[in-house]
Amino acid sequence: MKKGGVGVGVGVGTVNNVKADYTAHNRKLLSKNSKKSKKVGACSCHTIRKGVPRVCDMPEICSLKNVVYECKITENSGEYSGQSESYVGITKGRFIARKRQHETSFLIRESKTATTLSEFVHDLKEAGIEHSFQWKILQQARSYSGTKSECQLCLAEKSRIFFAEQPLMNQRSELFAKCKHRKIFKFKPPDQPLSRAPSSSESE
């Protein structure tokens, strides 16, 4: 039935055809994304900068996301030569990006207190102690996605810290820290307050 204007009739067959087109299109996109994620060695670090090839030292894990990682530091000189200390952390984004953030904090004196890891590294550098790093992925877990379930990534990190076989340089307070991944799902008020509705006298 047409009501006030030109009506366009849409049959059941037409709706089914549109639905089939959308389903096929979505399936095609999901298939492409799946192939990309399963591609072995999908590392974007193998680039050439200023004519010099840049080779990634960990192409198998650098692009992984939602991971719990460990950085193990071994002292190669000084009184405690041969001893190691480990730090456990997490990242929702690509592992290589988080690793580079850590490495930048190791170089900048003002970033010494950024993490307990950077503080430890700066202490070694100030004491003139040679040291080496070993990075590895402990596990992958889903980060908070806006549902009622807990953030599996944060829980995995806390579990790794709490049940570590050897003492870690992580602070115990990290076990009680709130999930940082929930912030992006919280309601954000507008930058400007809503304008006050005019009264009847003002609107006349």
Image: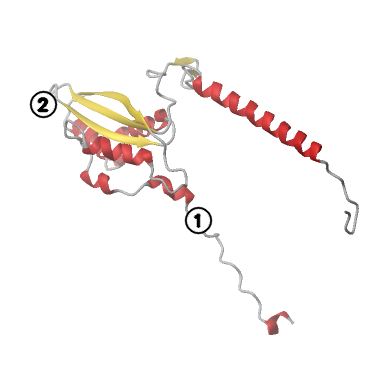
Could you say which disc has been placed on residue 73 in the image?
none
Looking at the picture, does residue 75 appear above or below residue 173? above
Q: What residue does disc 1 label?
A: 187
Q: Which of marks 1 and 2 is nearer the N terminus?
A: 2
Q: Which residue is drawn at 50% across and 20% down?
A: 38
Whether residue 139 appears in this view of the structure is yes
Question: Which of the numbered marks, if any, corresponds to residue 80?
Answer: 2
56 vs 48, left or right, is left
* Disc 1, SS: loop
- Quick one: SS at disc 2? loop
| 121 or 51: nearer the viewer | 121
For the question of whether residue 109 can be seen, the reply is no
Q: Which residue is drawn at 30% across and 42% down?
A: 114
User: Which kind of residue does numbered mark 1 sit on?
Assistant: Phe
Which residue type carries mark 2? Tyr
Q: Residue at x 57, y 26 (%)?
A: 33
Q: Which residue lies furthest to the front in this view?
A: 12
Residue 11 is drawn in which quadrant? top right
**Residue sitting nearer the eye, 96 or 157:** 157
Q: Where is residue 20 in the image (x, y as percent from the top left)?
A: 72, 32
As drawn, 80 above or below 174: above
Instruction: Tell me the quarter of the image containing the N terminus.
Output: bottom right
Residue 8 in the image: state x and y as whole percent: 87, 47
Image coordinates for residue 44, horizontal then vertical, percent: 49, 22
Considering every residue shown, the one lying at the far left of the view is 79
Mark 2, other Cα within 10 Å: few <14 / some 14–19 / many ≥20: few
